[in-house]
Amino acid sequence: MMKLNLPEMLQKQMNTERAERDKNLQPVYKELIGSAGYTAPDENIVEDAVIALAMGKNVLLKGPTGSGKTKLAELLSYLFGQPLHQVNASVDLDAEALLGHKTLSYREGRQEIDFIAGPVTKAAELGHFLYIDEINIAKPETLPILNGMLDYRRTIANPFTGEVVKAKPGFNVIAAINEGYIGTVPLNEALKNRFVVIEVPYIQGDTLKSMLSSQSQQGDEDVLSKFVQLSADLVSQAKAGHLSEEAASIRALLDAADLSVYMPPRRAVQRAIADKLEDQREKALVSNVAGTLF
Protein backbone atom coordinates (compact mmCIF):
# COMPACT_ATOMS: atom_id res chain seq x y z
CA MET A 1 0.00 0.00 0.00
CA MET A 2 1.10 3.58 -0.67
CA LYS A 3 3.20 5.02 2.17
CA LEU A 4 1.75 8.21 3.62
CA ASN A 5 3.29 10.59 6.12
CA LEU A 6 0.24 10.81 8.38
CA PRO A 7 -0.09 11.61 12.08
CA GLU A 8 0.24 8.33 13.99
CA MET A 9 -3.21 8.61 15.54
CA LEU A 10 -4.92 9.02 12.15
CA GLN A 11 -2.89 6.20 10.61
CA LYS A 12 -3.90 3.80 13.39
CA GLN A 13 -7.52 4.87 13.02
CA MET A 14 -7.41 4.24 9.27
CA ASN A 15 -5.77 0.85 9.67
CA THR A 16 -8.28 -0.27 12.31
CA GLU A 17 -11.31 0.89 10.33
CA ARG A 18 -9.98 -0.59 7.09
CA ALA A 19 -9.38 -3.99 8.71
CA GLU A 20 -12.87 -4.01 10.26
CA ARG A 21 -14.44 -2.91 6.99
CA ASP A 22 -12.57 -5.52 4.95
CA LYS A 23 -13.74 -8.26 7.31
CA ASN A 24 -17.43 -7.40 6.92
CA LEU A 25 -17.61 -6.08 3.35
CA GLN A 26 -19.70 -8.06 0.89
CA PRO A 27 -17.91 -9.15 -2.34
CA VAL A 28 -20.25 -7.06 -4.50
CA TYR A 29 -19.08 -3.92 -2.72
CA LYS A 30 -15.40 -4.88 -2.72
CA GLU A 31 -15.61 -4.52 -6.51
CA LEU A 32 -16.39 -0.81 -6.01
CA ILE A 33 -13.08 -0.13 -4.24
CA GLY A 34 -10.75 1.92 -6.45
CA SER A 35 -7.15 1.24 -7.42
CA ALA A 36 -3.79 2.91 -6.79
CA GLY A 37 -3.42 4.38 -10.28
CA TYR A 38 -2.93 8.06 -9.40
CA THR A 39 0.51 9.68 -9.46
CA ALA A 40 0.62 12.90 -7.44
CA PRO A 41 2.67 15.94 -8.50
CA ASP A 42 2.91 16.75 -4.79
CA GLU A 43 2.56 14.14 -2.03
CA ASN A 44 0.71 16.70 0.11
CA ILE A 45 -2.23 16.46 -2.28
CA VAL A 46 -2.92 12.85 -1.31
CA GLU A 47 -2.00 13.27 2.35
CA ASP A 48 -4.21 16.33 2.84
CA ALA A 49 -7.17 14.62 1.14
CA VAL A 50 -6.68 11.53 3.33
CA ILE A 51 -6.48 13.61 6.52
CA ALA A 52 -9.67 15.50 5.61
CA LEU A 53 -11.59 12.30 4.89
CA ALA A 54 -10.26 10.56 8.00
CA MET A 55 -11.61 13.50 10.02
CA GLY A 56 -15.03 13.04 8.45
CA LYS A 57 -14.86 15.99 6.08
CA ASN A 58 -15.93 16.14 2.44
CA VAL A 59 -13.31 16.83 -0.23
CA LEU A 60 -13.66 18.89 -3.41
CA LEU A 61 -10.99 18.11 -6.02
CA LYS A 62 -10.45 21.17 -8.18
CA GLY A 63 -8.32 21.08 -11.32
CA PRO A 64 -8.23 21.12 -15.11
CA THR A 65 -9.66 18.42 -17.36
CA GLY A 66 -7.52 15.29 -17.44
CA SER A 67 -5.42 16.20 -14.40
CA GLY A 68 -6.35 12.95 -12.66
CA LYS A 69 -9.16 13.94 -10.28
CA THR A 70 -11.11 10.72 -10.81
CA LYS A 71 -7.92 8.67 -10.45
CA LEU A 72 -7.24 10.47 -7.17
CA ALA A 73 -10.76 9.68 -5.94
CA GLU A 74 -10.17 6.02 -6.78
CA LEU A 75 -6.84 6.10 -4.93
CA LEU A 76 -8.56 7.53 -1.84
CA SER A 77 -11.12 4.72 -2.06
CA TYR A 78 -8.24 2.23 -2.25
CA LEU A 79 -6.34 3.74 0.70
CA PHE A 80 -9.41 3.61 2.95
CA GLY A 81 -10.67 0.30 1.57
CA GLN A 82 -13.93 2.11 0.98
CA PRO A 83 -16.33 1.28 -1.88
CA LEU A 84 -16.87 4.29 -4.14
CA HIS A 85 -20.40 4.96 -5.39
CA GLN A 86 -20.23 7.31 -8.37
CA VAL A 87 -22.44 10.05 -9.80
CA ASN A 88 -21.56 11.56 -13.18
CA ALA A 89 -23.16 14.98 -13.02
CA SER A 90 -24.93 16.45 -16.04
CA VAL A 91 -27.55 19.09 -16.78
CA ASP A 92 -30.13 16.27 -16.59
CA LEU A 93 -29.12 15.23 -13.07
CA ASP A 94 -32.19 15.21 -10.83
CA ALA A 95 -33.31 13.96 -7.42
CA GLU A 96 -34.15 10.50 -8.77
CA ALA A 97 -30.66 10.05 -10.23
CA LEU A 98 -29.18 10.92 -6.82
CA LEU A 99 -31.60 9.36 -4.35
CA GLY A 100 -33.33 6.60 -6.32
CA HIS A 101 -36.68 5.88 -7.92
CA LYS A 102 -39.82 3.83 -7.51
CA THR A 103 -40.59 0.86 -9.74
CA LEU A 104 -43.31 -1.75 -10.10
CA SER A 105 -42.59 -5.35 -9.17
CA TYR A 106 -44.61 -8.54 -8.81
CA ARG A 107 -44.59 -10.89 -5.82
CA GLU A 108 -46.79 -13.94 -5.62
CA GLY A 109 -48.93 -12.55 -8.43
CA ARG A 110 -49.42 -9.20 -6.71
CA GLN A 111 -48.21 -5.86 -8.01
CA GLU A 112 -46.09 -3.89 -5.54
CA ILE A 113 -44.08 -0.69 -5.59
CA ASP A 114 -40.39 -0.96 -4.73
CA PHE A 115 -37.87 1.79 -4.17
CA ILE A 116 -34.54 1.35 -5.97
CA ALA A 117 -31.90 3.28 -4.02
CA GLY A 118 -29.68 5.70 -5.92
CA PRO A 119 -25.94 6.24 -5.31
CA VAL A 120 -26.39 8.88 -2.59
CA THR A 121 -28.84 6.72 -0.64
CA LYS A 122 -26.75 3.57 -1.05
CA ALA A 123 -23.49 5.22 0.00
CA ALA A 124 -25.14 6.84 3.02
CA GLU A 125 -26.96 3.72 4.23
CA LEU A 126 -23.85 1.57 3.84
CA GLY A 127 -21.32 4.09 5.19
CA HIS A 128 -19.35 4.17 1.91
CA PHE A 129 -17.74 6.96 -0.12
CA LEU A 130 -19.74 8.93 -2.69
CA TYR A 131 -17.96 10.47 -5.70
CA ILE A 132 -19.68 13.22 -7.71
CA ASP A 133 -17.77 13.93 -10.91
CA GLU A 134 -18.04 17.37 -12.55
CA ILE A 135 -20.42 18.52 -9.85
CA ASN A 136 -20.59 22.07 -11.28
CA ILE A 137 -22.21 20.84 -14.50
CA ALA A 138 -25.40 19.95 -12.59
CA LYS A 139 -28.24 22.48 -12.47
CA PRO A 140 -27.85 24.74 -9.39
CA GLU A 141 -31.39 23.92 -8.26
CA THR A 142 -30.59 20.17 -8.05
CA LEU A 143 -27.63 20.19 -5.68
CA PRO A 144 -29.12 21.88 -2.58
CA ILE A 145 -30.96 18.63 -1.77
CA LEU A 146 -27.52 17.32 -0.76
CA ASN A 147 -26.80 20.08 1.77
CA GLY A 148 -28.04 18.14 4.79
CA MET A 149 -25.99 15.10 3.79
CA LEU A 150 -22.86 17.22 3.40
CA ASP A 151 -22.91 18.99 6.77
CA TYR A 152 -22.77 17.81 10.38
CA ARG A 153 -26.32 16.40 10.19
CA ARG A 154 -25.43 13.75 7.60
CA THR A 155 -29.13 13.32 6.83
CA ILE A 156 -31.39 13.77 3.84
CA ALA A 157 -35.16 13.67 3.52
CA ASN A 158 -36.09 11.27 0.72
CA PRO A 159 -39.14 12.79 -1.05
CA PHE A 160 -39.88 9.46 -2.78
CA THR A 161 -40.29 7.40 0.41
CA GLY A 162 -40.98 10.04 3.06
CA GLU A 163 -38.08 8.66 5.10
CA VAL A 164 -35.12 10.52 6.55
CA VAL A 165 -31.88 8.83 5.52
CA LYS A 166 -29.13 9.02 8.16
CA ALA A 167 -25.64 8.29 6.89
CA LYS A 168 -23.66 5.60 8.68
CA PRO A 169 -20.15 6.32 9.97
CA GLY A 170 -17.62 6.18 7.12
CA PHE A 171 -19.83 8.02 4.64
CA ASN A 172 -18.03 10.93 3.01
CA VAL A 173 -18.40 12.82 -0.24
CA ILE A 174 -15.62 13.41 -2.75
CA ALA A 175 -16.53 15.75 -5.60
CA ALA A 176 -14.62 17.00 -8.65
CA ILE A 177 -14.89 20.35 -10.35
CA ASN A 178 -13.50 21.91 -13.55
CA GLU A 179 -13.76 25.67 -13.11
CA GLY A 180 -14.31 27.68 -16.27
CA TYR A 181 -15.01 24.60 -18.40
CA ILE A 182 -17.75 24.87 -21.03
CA GLY A 183 -21.16 24.04 -19.56
CA THR A 184 -20.17 24.56 -15.93
CA VAL A 185 -21.68 27.01 -13.45
CA PRO A 186 -20.16 28.44 -10.25
CA LEU A 187 -20.89 26.35 -7.19
CA ASN A 188 -23.30 27.79 -4.67
CA GLU A 189 -21.26 29.17 -1.74
CA ALA A 190 -23.36 27.22 0.78
CA LEU A 191 -22.44 24.04 -1.08
CA LYS A 192 -18.77 24.87 -1.57
CA ASN A 193 -18.39 25.72 2.13
CA ARG A 194 -19.26 22.11 2.98
CA PHE A 195 -16.02 20.90 1.35
CA VAL A 196 -12.30 21.03 1.97
CA VAL A 197 -10.80 22.06 -1.38
CA ILE A 198 -7.78 20.22 -2.82
CA GLU A 199 -6.12 21.66 -5.92
CA VAL A 200 -5.16 18.95 -8.44
CA PRO A 201 -2.75 20.33 -11.07
CA TYR A 202 -1.33 18.54 -14.08
CA ILE A 203 1.65 16.35 -13.28
CA GLN A 204 4.81 17.33 -15.13
CA GLY A 205 8.53 16.59 -15.44
CA ASP A 206 10.04 13.54 -13.77
CA THR A 207 6.74 12.70 -12.04
CA LEU A 208 4.95 12.54 -15.37
CA LYS A 209 7.70 10.44 -16.92
CA SER A 210 7.53 8.02 -14.00
CA MET A 211 3.76 7.73 -14.46
CA LEU A 212 4.09 7.15 -18.21
CA SER A 213 6.80 4.55 -17.61
CA SER A 214 4.61 2.60 -15.20
CA GLN A 215 1.24 2.98 -16.92
CA SER A 216 2.00 3.32 -20.62
CA GLN A 217 2.75 0.49 -23.04
CA GLN A 218 5.49 2.65 -24.55
CA GLY A 219 8.84 1.57 -23.14
CA ASP A 220 11.27 3.69 -25.16
CA GLU A 221 12.81 6.20 -22.72
CA ASP A 222 13.60 8.72 -25.45
CA VAL A 223 10.04 8.66 -26.79
CA LEU A 224 8.64 9.01 -23.27
CA SER A 225 10.88 12.02 -22.64
CA LYS A 226 9.50 13.64 -25.76
CA PHE A 227 5.95 13.02 -24.57
CA VAL A 228 6.83 14.70 -21.27
CA GLN A 229 8.10 17.73 -23.21
CA LEU A 230 4.98 17.65 -25.39
CA SER A 231 2.84 17.81 -22.26
CA ALA A 232 4.81 20.78 -20.92
CA ASP A 233 4.38 22.61 -24.23
CA LEU A 234 0.63 21.90 -24.38
CA VAL A 235 0.08 22.95 -20.77
CA SER A 236 1.97 26.18 -21.49
CA GLN A 237 -0.21 26.86 -24.54
CA ALA A 238 -3.35 26.12 -22.52
CA LYS A 239 -2.32 28.50 -19.73
CA ALA A 240 -1.68 31.18 -22.36
CA GLY A 241 -5.22 30.70 -23.67
CA HIS A 242 -4.18 29.31 -27.06
CA LEU A 243 -5.50 25.80 -26.34
CA SER A 244 -8.41 24.37 -24.37
CA GLU A 245 -7.61 22.35 -21.25
CA GLU A 246 -8.76 19.23 -23.09
CA ALA A 247 -5.64 19.40 -25.26
CA ALA A 248 -3.40 19.24 -22.18
CA SER A 249 -5.20 16.25 -20.65
CA ILE A 250 -2.82 13.73 -19.07
CA ARG A 251 -5.35 11.03 -19.88
CA ALA A 252 -5.14 11.89 -23.59
CA LEU A 253 -1.34 12.03 -23.37
CA LEU A 254 -1.31 8.49 -21.96
CA ASP A 255 -3.49 7.34 -24.86
CA ALA A 256 -1.07 8.92 -27.32
CA ALA A 257 1.91 7.24 -25.65
CA ASP A 258 0.16 3.86 -25.89
CA LEU A 259 -0.71 4.35 -29.56
CA SER A 260 2.87 5.35 -30.33
CA VAL A 261 3.94 1.75 -29.75
CA TYR A 262 2.25 0.77 -33.02
CA MET A 263 2.18 4.00 -35.05
CA PRO A 264 4.45 7.03 -35.48
CA PRO A 265 4.26 9.25 -32.35
CA ARG A 266 3.16 12.30 -34.32
CA ARG A 267 0.20 10.37 -35.74
CA ALA A 268 -0.58 9.02 -32.27
CA VAL A 269 -0.78 12.60 -30.97
CA GLN A 270 -3.08 13.47 -33.87
CA ARG A 271 -5.47 10.62 -33.04
CA ALA A 272 -5.41 10.85 -29.23
CA ILE A 273 -5.23 14.63 -28.77
CA ALA A 274 -5.60 16.86 -31.84
CA ASP A 275 -8.60 15.15 -33.44
CA LYS A 276 -10.63 15.50 -30.22
CA LEU A 277 -10.57 19.27 -30.57
CA GLU A 278 -13.30 21.18 -32.39
CA ASP A 279 -11.33 24.32 -33.24
CA GLN A 280 -9.23 23.92 -36.40
CA ARG A 281 -6.63 26.39 -35.16
CA GLU A 282 -6.19 24.37 -31.98
CA LYS A 283 -5.83 21.17 -34.00
CA ALA A 284 -3.15 22.80 -36.13
CA LEU A 285 -1.33 24.13 -33.06
CA VAL A 286 -1.18 20.68 -31.42
CA SER A 287 0.10 19.17 -34.68
CA ASN A 288 2.76 21.86 -34.98
CA VAL A 289 3.91 21.36 -31.38
CA ALA A 290 4.11 17.62 -31.92
CA GLY A 291 6.01 18.20 -35.18
CA THR A 292 8.81 19.98 -33.33
CA LEU A 293 9.39 16.87 -31.18
CA PHE A 294 8.60 13.83 -33.33
Image: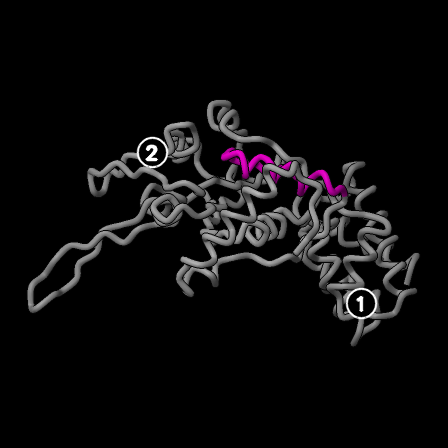
- Identify the residue at horizontal 81%, vertical 48% (top origin): 204
Percent coordinates x, y for residue 158 in the rendering = 27, 39
- Identify the residue at horizontal 47%, vertical 23% (top origin): 190
- Identify the residue at horizontal 73%, vertical 64% (top origin): 215
Callout 1 crowding tier (Cα within 10 Å): few <14, some 14–19, many ≥20: some
Q: Which mark is residue 267?
A: 1
Q: Give left or right: position of 63 versus 146.
A: right
What is the secondary structure assignment of the residue under circle 2?
Answer: strand
Toward the bottom, the furthest residue is 262
Magenta span: 42-63
Is residue 181 covered in magenta? no
For the question of whether residue 178 can be seen, the reply is no
Closest to the observer, 44 or 130 = 44
Percent coordinates x, y for residue 189 in the rendering = 51, 23
Give whichever of discs 2 and 1 has the lower sequence position: 2
Q: Nearer the viewer, mark 2 or mark 1?
A: 2
Percent coordinates x, y for residue 10 in the rendering = 59, 38
Q: Which residue is mark 2?
A: 155
Closest to the observer, 235 or 17 = 17
Percent coordinates x, y for residue 142 in the rendering = 39, 35
> Which amino acid is tagged 2?
Thr
Is residue 58 covered in magenta? yes
Is the C terminus in the top left, top right, bottom left or bottom right quadrant?
Answer: bottom right
What is the secondary structure assignment of the residue under circle 1?
Answer: helix
Q: Quadrant of residue 179?
A: top right
Q: How is the image coloured?
A: one colour
> Which amino acid is tagged 1?
Arg
Q: Is residue 266 above or below residue 137?
A: below
For the question of whether residue 229 can be seen, the reply is yes
